[in-house]
Image: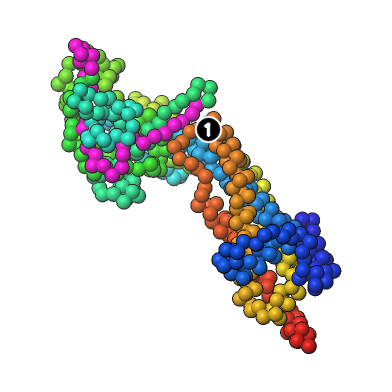
Amino acid sequence: IFNIYISAIIPTLRGNNTSIIQEIKNNKQVKYRKRIAIFDKIYSIEFKLSLKNLKRNKNKYRVISSLLVVCMTSYIAVSTYINYEKEAVDILNEHDVDAELVVDATSNIDYISILQDYNAKAGNQIEYMEYKIMGPYVLVEPESALATDELVVTYENNKKSTYVTLVGLDDKTYNHYINKLKGKKGDCIIYNNAMEIEGEEELVYRYYSVFKTNVDLKLSIIEMIKNLETQKEEYEIIDDNNLNGNFILTENLIEGYKEIKNEYSRPTVFLNMDTYNEIDKIFKDYTSQKDYTSQDEQGVPKWMWNEIDAIHIKVKCENIIDFSKYIDNINEQQDFQITADYYSLEKQEKNIYVNILQLILGIIVSMIIIIGITSTISIINACLYERKRELEILESLGSTKENINKILIYECIVIFIKAIIISIIILIPIIKAIIKHMENLIILNKSFIPFKNICLFITFLFILSLSTTLYSTKLIKIGRTENNENFKN
């Protein structure tokens, strides 16, 4: 309130106590410099008058520029910091479902009936998604389709393979995903981000693309074989049909599969369940014909990671505590076992910090912007009221309303450009400090500065300042006719 009162009353009192001659002259702050003739030819008379007016009223317009700078720097700095904090917390929060169940497909567990019974008894709305998963090596053709040499094995014939995660989605989830990406049924979706964790005390997440876009990609599932004589890697193709459809490369994950972003250090290929089951059948037929001496505990070759006959069910529910008790009772009452992991409570705790931080910083920056904008409007109005007699005399000397509006518009543009330049100079070290601080938690290949929101905010400030300036010129109409008659007399 004090800020607004001072910004309004001082120019108003000064305007009432300043003579018309001094108002027009007002040359106390002007430093005369040698004129550049070329500017006189390029710039319009209104623009040159606006520059002279800014020189004659430096102190007044410095306050306006300062307020605009405060609004811009506070909004840009805080919004950038919040964006980076959200991204850091988003990475730390690895799940966007409440729970995940794992059942053995060979045990014929009717998990759908179990979930439906819970929904009927508890009266809580529940959603579930089914998927299967395996991790094979795939031969990549052409080799130029690979955007990085990380996770890549090169063979003697210059062929290259990489490690991927295959995820088979249920029909509902797959159709939703493929429609969201505007693809066709049967297309393979590749989440093209691989992740690498760096650091010891503080984990740093680095992301990079594996496949290049706009390349006719072909993938073949292979077995990697170690040649004992040459000590080099060789391969044998297991399946070169099911992964040769149309590939859609994306950096957007379907809702419910957020943990894939940080759980696997390789790209993920999403398939419909029919395609996945066909690949799984080919894999089992192939391995059944082999005599592996190096196998894991489940009898699966070590070059292929696969959860044999495991069905994963992602669950979203309203009451995770009640749901966990229900599953525990089912496991106690039945002979089979349902493995369950619950994520909601951990996720909720991790979100507390960023939500509080966003609320506090949002309130602070909102107060700064509101006070700054209100003060700017008050000062603009007061300055124009102080110059009221000057503008009336300009009109009496032959200036049209359009001429006067042009002068004021040019003044507003010059002040705004000056404020933007000053803001950029101030913001460069601030943004660098924010990014450097956040790099202690996360390193990404792209910037999270909200350029779109920043441009919208700056545009809003400019339109508001310009509208205030033009609207305030209505004050000039007061006494204009009387002033014109007195001047003629």
Position of 182 with respect to 56 (left or right) is left
Outermost residue to the left: 289
Q: Is residue 347 something one can see in this rendering?
A: no
**Is residue 231 a member of the stretch shown in magenta?**
yes
Answer with the quarter of the image where residue 68 lies. bottom right
Can you identify the residue that label 1 sits on?
Answer: 439
Outermost residue to the top: 229
Give, as a single range, the part of the protein colored magenta.
203-232
Position of 446 with respect to 414 (left or right) is left
Q: In the image, is residue 486 above or below residue 157?
A: below
Answer with the quarter of the image where residue 355 lies. top right
In this orientation, which residue lies closer to the viewer: 228 or 171? 228
Q: Is residue 446 something one can see in this rendering?
A: yes
In this orientation, which residue lies closer to the viewer: 196 or 353? 196
In this orientation, which residue lies closer to the viewer: 97 or 351? 351
Which quarter of the figure is the C terminus placed in?
Answer: bottom right
Residue 20 x/y as whole percent: 80, 73
Q: In the image, is residue 223 above or below residue 414?
A: above
At 39% from the left edge and 34% from the top edge, which residue is drawn?
208
Which quarter of the figure is the N terminus placed in?
Answer: bottom right
Q: In the image, is residue 350 above or below residue 43?
A: above
Which class describes the residues within 10 Å of circle 1: few (<14), some (14-19), or many (20+)? Answer: some
Residue 288 x/y as whole percent: 17, 22
Q: How many marks?
A: 1
Answer with the quarter of the image where residue 445 lies. top left
Kind of residue at disc 1 = Glu
**Is residue 118 a member of the stretch shown in magenta?**
no
In this orientation, which residue lies closer to the viewer: 410 or 212? 410
At 72% from the left edge and 68% from the top edge, which residue is drawn?
384
Residue 57 x/y as whole percent: 73, 62
